[in-house]
Amino acid sequence: MSGKGPLAGIRVLDATGVIVGPTSTLLLAEQGADVIKVEPPEGDLMRKLGGKAPAGKPGMSPKFTHFNRNKRSIMLDLKSPQGREVMLRLAATSDVFVSNMRPRALKSLGLTWEALSAINPKLVHCTIAGFATGGPYDGAPAYDTIIQGLSGVAACNEAMLGEPRFAPFVLTDHIVGIIAAQAICAALVARERSGEGQAIEVPMFENAAAFVLSEHLGQRTFDPEGTMGDPRIMTPDARPMRTKDGYICVSANTDAQARGFFEAIGRPELKDDPRFKDVPARLAHVKDYFGLRAQALQERTTAEWVELLRRHDVPAMPYHTLTSLLDDPQLRGSGTLTREDGEDWMLGLRHANRYSGSGLPPSRLAPRQGEHGEEILAELGYDAAERARILGKESAA
């Protein structure tokens, strides 16, 4: 896709599916890269698994729609000689190749770093894997819930809720997809300096485990018998707090914020309480501190507290349900949540970041399955007869 954006002019060959890979390539697409999504004849699994598609738009599930904006789609059977030939021609003209296939599948399809770099030495080859190579889990299949349970995410919920639970969204898929996009951009910068591409391996488990442990390794960092877990986050009171008419989100971490909070709730004497006088004291007595906050906030409405706490420079915002989030004035005002009035009405999402120098490309809806096959093949130099032959065998009706 041509247009503005810091990655304009970069072509990404996207051989990913479901969430983790499409999250990565979505970020690249929304920053201006031309992302060519290569789908098998049956399409990305998320076309069916991601919710109910609207009438007349088969395969356009809500999740697929949101994770595949600004991309182009071509359908290829990579197990056929014809499909592999097209894929190799795409790889020869691309800057980046991204896949979340298992290593064995990449090898059988001839899409490893060794194979593709032989035809395109400047290619950045990124593989998103469940596990890093060399360990006992190497090559094992992985989905977000597997990684959440293995990496300690579910255990963090157990510490708060009394039983292990997954986060109610594909947390590790999002985290690792973002990390993969960052790694790709770093490799592109390195290529500008060296003129050479490179292979990148982005393992889900190791990245998710590091994400959890950087937060909760705690005193075990220095002491083999030390405690783990940040008590400010692990305590059951670390949650939206009830007000007179709903809930509110408050965070008073610095000494100045804590003093402002005590003034706002009409308890200025607590500023001199030894339990709350500074950051170390409040951390040591986090249960008392959070309990006091929860009790005090029940005395006024959410709107009253938000106004009062802001006057005392204490970070506070209303609590949103999934439904009320859609009416948030900040999301609407910034253009992050939009109403798309194209072929049919829908709520859309747009890239939230801003770039002063390059701007951003116009937002485009996710592609229909194989929607851009004709134009992509033409760009690769296939004539009309060849395009008809390829698409006639591999496109969905």
Image (tube, rainbow, N blue to C red):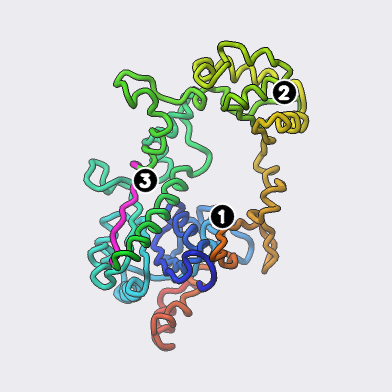
Regarding mark 1 in the picture, which secondary structure is present there? loop
Regarding mark 3 in the picture, which secondary structure is present there? helix
Callout 3: few (<14), some (14-19), or many (20+) C-alpha neighbours within 10 Å?
Answer: many
Looking at the image, tell me whether mark 1 or mark 2 is earlier in sequence order.
2
Rounded to the nearest angstrom, the CA distance separating label 3 from label 1 is 25 Å
Q: Which of 140 and 359 is in front in this view?
A: 359
Q: Which residue position is annotated with label 2?
A: 264
Left or right of residue 224, residue 357 in this image? right
Pointer 3 with pointer 1, Cβ within 8 A: no
Badge number at residue 204: 3
Residue 65: name its quadrant. bottom right
Q: Nearer the viewer, mark 3 or mark 2?
A: 2
Above or below for 46 versus 86: above
Mark 1 residue type = Asn
Q: Which of marks 1 and 2 is in front?
A: 2
Mark 3 residue type = Met
Q: Give the range drawn in magenta.
A: 196-206
Can residue 216 be seen by looking at this rendering?
yes
Q: Which of marks 3 and 1 is in front?
A: 1
Q: Which residue position is annotated with label 1?
A: 353
Residue 152: name its quadrant. top left
Above or below for 320 versus 69: above
Rounded to the nearest angstrom, the CA distance separating label 1 from label 2 is 34 Å
| Residue at screen point 52% across, 42% down | 169
Left or right of residue 260, residue 164 in this image? left
Rounded to the nearest angstrom, the CA distance separating label 3 from label 2 is 44 Å
